[in-house]
C-alpha cells in the first residue's frame, strides 16, 4: 500500500497584470506550466507502507502446505537447539570451551531463525526494517562465533598442552562478547544504508523475509554505491570469516596427520568434521548471496531457505550424531527426565 498526492490545476487570471507589468502571455504560460509541473512532481511521491512477499504467490492451498513445511522445520529446529542448550547446562562434563561455544551457537540459531519465520503475505515497512536489523545482527554474530569455534579446535589439536591456559573462561567470554558487538555494528550499518533509500513502489519482495539484496531492487534510485557498500560489509565479513576458519582447519589437518595412533586421528577428525560441515552449510550460501551485486538468480530462493531454515535445523543433528559425548549426555538427561 502507498499513498498518492495529486494537485488540481489552478485557474489564474493574469490579464490585467500583463498590461501593467508588460509581461508577455508566453512568459506567463511558461511560468504557470513550470510551477504546476514542479508542484505535481513534488507532491506525487509514493511512500511504501508495506511489502508483499510474492515468493508464496500461488494457490492458497499450496501456500498453507508450504507454510506447514516451514512450521515443521521450525519446530524441529526449536526443539533440537533447546535440547542441546539444556544438555550442555545439565552435564558438568560438557562445561568446557568447545561446548560453551556450541551452546551459544544453538542460541543464535534459535534467534535468527525465529526472526526469519515466514509471514505468508505482507509485512509493514517498520516490521520489515526490524526484521532486517535482527537478522543481520544474529547472522553476523554467528559468522564470528564460527571463527571462535575454529580457533578453539585449532588450539585443542595443535597445542593440547597449552589448551586450558590459552582457552580460559575469561577469553571465551570476551570472544562471545566480541561476536555480539561486531554483530551490533554490522546490523546498524546495513539498516542505516537500507533506510536511507527511497521506496516509492513496487512493493513486492521476491523472498519470504526482509533482507538487503531483495529490498535494494525495489528502491527507486541508483543503488550502485549501496551495492558496493553491501559487498564490502556483508560479503567481506562472511568471506573473511570463512577463509579464517579454512586456514585454521588447514593447520588442524596437518596436526591430525602427525598423530601416530589411528584412534587418536579418528577422534580428532570426528570432532572437527561436524564443525566443518556446519560451517560449509552456513558460509557457502552467505558468500553466494552477499559477494555479488543485488541481482536476481533462479537459485536465490533455494539458497535463502537453506541457510535460514535448513542449516540451523541440521546443526543439532550433525553435532549430536557425530559427537559421542553429546549423545551420551542427551541419553543421560532423557533418562533423568523420564524417571
Image (cartoon, rainbow, N blue to C red):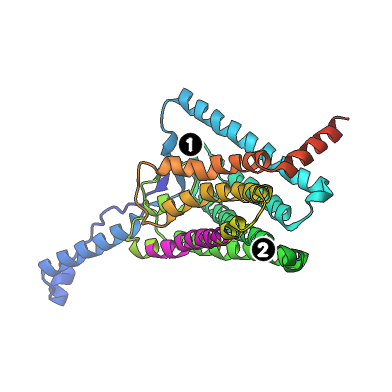
The residue sitting at 37% across, 51% down in the picture is 218
Q: Quadrant of the N terminus?
A: top left
Q: Please name which of the two marks, 2 or 1, marks the residue nearer to the observer.
A: 2
Start and end of the magenta stretch?
Answer: 228-250
Q: Residue furthest bottom?
A: 21
Q: Which residue is mark 1?
A: 121
Q: Which residue is mark 2?
A: 155
Q: Nearer the viewer, residue 264 or 8?
A: 264
State left or right for residue 203 relative to residue 12: right
Q: Earlier in the sequence, mark 2 or mark 1?
A: 1
Magenta span includes 233 = yes
The residue sitting at 35% across, 60% down in the picture is 223
x and y percentages locating residue 243 in the rendered image: 50, 61
x and y percentages locating residue 331 in the rendered image: 78, 35
Q: Residue furthest top?
A: 61
The vertical placement of 245 against 124, above or below, is below
The total of numbered circles placed on residues is 2
Q: Nearer the viewer, residue 156 or 244?
A: 156
The reply to whether residue 155 is visible in this rendering is: yes
Q: Nearer the viewer, residue 224 or 320?
A: 320
Could you tell me how far apart the alpha carbons at marks 2 and 1 are, in whole angstroms? Answer: 48 Å
Q: Secondary structure at mark 1?
A: loop
x and y percentages locating residue 64 in the rendered image: 51, 27
Amino acid at each position: 500500500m502507498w499513498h498518492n498526492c495529486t494537485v488540481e490545476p489552478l485557474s489564474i487570471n493574469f490579464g490585467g497584470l500583463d498590461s501593467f507589468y508588460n509581461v508577455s502571455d508566453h512568459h506567463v504560460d511558461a511560468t504557470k506550466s513550470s510551477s504546476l509541473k514542479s508542484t505535481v512532481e513534488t507532491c506525487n511521491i509514493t511512500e511504501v507502507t508495506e511489502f508483499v512477499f510474492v515468493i508464496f504467490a500461488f494457490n492458497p492451498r499450496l501456500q498453507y502446505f508450504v507454510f506447514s513445511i516451514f512450521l515443521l522445520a521450525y519446530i524441529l529446529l526449536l526443539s533440537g537447539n533447546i535440547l542441546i542448550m539444556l544438555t550442555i547446562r545439565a552435564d558438568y562434563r560438557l562445561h568446557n570451551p568447545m561446548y560453551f561455544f556450541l551452546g551459544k551457537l544453538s542460541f543464535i540459531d534459535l534467534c535468527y531463525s525465529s526472526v526469519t519465520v515466514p509471514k505468508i503475505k505482507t509485512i509493514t515497512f517498520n516490521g520489515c526494517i526490524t526484521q532486517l536489523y535482527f537478522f543481520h545482527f544474529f547472522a553476523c554474530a554467528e559468522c564470528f562465533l564460527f571463527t571462535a569455534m575454529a580457533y578453539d579446535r585449532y588450539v585443542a589439536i595443535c597445542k593440547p598442552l597449552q589448551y586450558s591456559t590459552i582457552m580460559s573462561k575469561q577469553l571465551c567470554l570476551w570472544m562471545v562478547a566480541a561476536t555480539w558487538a561486531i554483530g551490533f555494528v554490522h546490523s546498524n550499518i546495513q539498516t542505516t544504508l537500507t533506510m536511507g533509500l527511497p521506496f516509492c513502489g513496487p512493493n513486492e519482495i521476491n523472498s519470504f523475509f526482509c533482507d538487503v539484496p531483495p529490498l535494494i531492487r525495489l528502491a527507486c534510485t541508483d543503488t550502485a554505491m549501496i551495492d558496493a557498500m553491501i559487498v564490502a560489509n556483508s560479503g567481506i565479513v562472511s568471506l573473511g570469516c570463512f577463509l579464517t576458519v579454512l586456514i585454521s582447519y588447514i593447520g588442524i589437518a596437518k596436526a591430525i596427520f602427525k598423530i601416530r595412533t589411528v584412534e587418536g586421528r579418528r577422534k580428532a577428525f570426528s570432532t572437527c568434521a561436524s564443525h566443518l560441515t556446519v560451517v560449509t552449510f552456513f558460509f557457502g550460501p552467505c558468500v553466494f548471496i552477499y559477494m555479488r551485486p543485488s541481482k536476481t538468480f533462479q537459485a536465490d530462493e533455494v539458497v535463502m531457505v537453506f541457510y535460514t531454515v535448513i542449516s540451523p535445523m541440521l546443526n543439532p543433528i550433525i553435532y549430536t550424531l557425530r559427537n559421542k559425548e553429546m549423545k551420551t549426555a542427551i541419553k543421560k538427561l532423557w533418562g533423568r527426565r523420564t524417571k
